[in-house]
Image: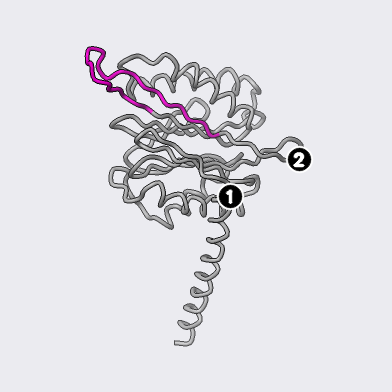
C-alpha cells in the first residue's frame, strides 16, 4: 500500500487508502489498513445529566503492511488506552510523539543501519476532538501536524500526485472555512484515488474510503459504490476531454 490520505470536511473527516500489497515478486493481495477508535469520558463526574466528551481517532498507512499493522496496534495500547479524564489534543500529541519515537527506534531504525534497507511505514493519524481537528503525518520519529493551513494530507509514493490533483481541482482552502461535506468529498476522493492508482506504480487494488462524522457516526463506503462512481467518472472525464479538444481546435481556427 503506497497511498493514504485524510481530508477534513464541514461535518467530519474522510480517510482513504489503496489496498494492494505485495506478498512476493509477481504475487499481490488485497488488504486494508484503515482503523478507527472512538473514546469517551465524562464531561463532569459531579453532573447527573449524561454528558460526555467524545473523541475519534482514524489511522491509515502507506508502505510495508506488516509494519503499518504493528504501528496501528501499538497506538491502541500506548496512545488511546487508559486516557485521563482531562484527555485533550495536547495530551494526545504528546503520547503520539512518545510512541512514534519508541516505535521507529525499536522496529524501523534498528532493522538496518542503511535507511535504504529499512521497511517503510508512512502513517496518517486523524484526530477529532470536540473543538479541534487535526491530521498528523508520522515518519521516522517525526510527527508533523496540519490543522489550519491545509485541509488534506497524503503519504506514500502516490502522495505528490494526490495532493497536486486535489489542489488543481479544489484550489487553496484553509481548514477553518471548509465548504464541502463528506458526501460531496467522497466522489472527488474516489476520482483522485483512481488517478493515483493508474499513474503511480505500486498503488493499486480497491480504494478503501471511510467517512468519520463529528456526531461519532462513521461509514465504510461499499466497494460496489466506489466501483460505480469510478465508471461514472470515466464517462464524465471522457466527455470533458472531448469538449476540451474541441475548444482547442476552435481556438486554432480563430
- Vertical position of residue 216 compared to residue 39: above or below: below
User: For the point 49% across and 22% down, which residue is it?
Assistant: 100
Disc 1 packing (10 Å; few <14; some 14–19; many ≥20): few
Q: Which residue is mark 1?
A: 224
Tag in front: 1 or 2: 1
User: For the point 50% across and 79% down, which residue is it?
Assistant: 246
Check the picture and name the quadrant holding the N terminus.
top right
User: For the point 42% across and 37% down, which residue is it?
Assistant: 212
Find residue 210 and report its horizontal and vertical position in percent. 48, 40
Q: How is the image coloured?
A: one colour
Tell me if label 1 and label 2 are in contact, CB under 8 Å: no
**Mark 1 to mark 2: distance in Å?**
24 Å
Pick the residue in front: 56 or 60: 56
Pick the residue in front: 173 or 190: 190
Magenta span contains residue 41: yes
Pick the residue in front: 247 or 186: 186
Residue 12 is marked as none
Q: Is residue 213 left or right of residue 76?
A: left
Pick the residue in front: 149 or 239: 239
How many marks do you count on the picture? 2
As helix, strand or loop, the secondary structure at mark 2 comes to strand
Q: Which residues are magenta?
A: 34-55
As helix, strand or loop, the secondary structure at mark 1 comes to helix
User: Which quadrant of the structure image shows residue 8?
Assistant: top left
Q: Which residue is mark 2?
A: 27
Find residue 47 and report its horizontal and vertical position in percent. 22, 16
Q: Is residue 172 left or right of residue 27?
A: left
Check the picture and name the quadrant holding the C terminus.
bottom left
Q: Is residue 30 left or right of residue 49?
A: right
- Vertical position of residue 172 compared to residue 236: above or below: above
Amino acid at each position: 500500500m503506497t497511498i493514504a490520505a485524510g481530508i477534513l470536511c464541514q461535518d467530519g473527516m474522510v480517510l482513504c487508502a489503496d489496498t494492494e500489497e505485495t506478498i512476493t515478486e509477481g504475487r499481490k493481495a488485497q488488504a486494508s489498513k484503515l482503523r478507527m477508535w472512538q473514546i469517551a469520558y465524562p464531561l463532569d463526574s459531579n453532573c447527573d445529566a449524561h454528558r460526555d466528551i467524545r473523541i475519534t481517532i482514524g489511522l491509515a498507512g502507506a508502505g510495508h503492511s506488516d509494519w503499518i499493522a504493528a504501528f496501528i496496534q501499538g497506538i491502541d495500547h500506548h496512545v488511546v488506552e487508559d486516557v485521563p479524564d482531562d484527555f485533550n489534543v495536547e495530551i494526545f500529541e504528546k503520547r503520539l510523539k512518545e510512541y512514534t519515537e519508541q516505535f521507529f527506534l525499536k522496529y524501523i531504525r534498528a532493522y538496518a543501519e542503511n535507511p535504504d534497507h529499512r521497511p517503510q511505514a508512512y502513517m496518517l493519524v486523524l484526530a477529532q476532538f470536540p473543538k479541534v481537528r487535526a491530521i498528523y503525518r508520522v515518519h521516522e520519529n517525526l510527527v508533523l501536524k496540519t490543522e489550519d493551513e491545509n485541509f488534506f494530507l497524503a503519504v506514500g509514493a502516490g502522495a505528490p500526485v494526490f495532493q497536486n490533483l486535489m489542489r488543481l481541482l479544489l484550489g487553496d482552502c484553509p481548514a477553518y472555512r471548509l465548504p464541502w461535506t463528506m458526501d460531496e468529498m467522497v466522489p472527488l476522493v474516489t476520482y483522485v484515488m483512481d488517478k493515483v492508482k493508474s499513474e503511480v506504480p505500486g498503488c493499486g487494488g480497491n480504494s478503501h474510503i471511510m467517512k468519520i462524522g463529528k456526531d461519532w457516526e462513521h461509514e465504510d463506503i461499499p466497494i460496489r459504490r466506489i466501483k460505480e462512481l469510478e465508471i461514472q467518472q470515466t464517462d464524465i472525464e471522457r466527455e470533458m476531454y472531448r469538449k476540451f479538444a474541441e475548444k482547442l481546435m476552435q481556438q486554432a481556427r480563430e
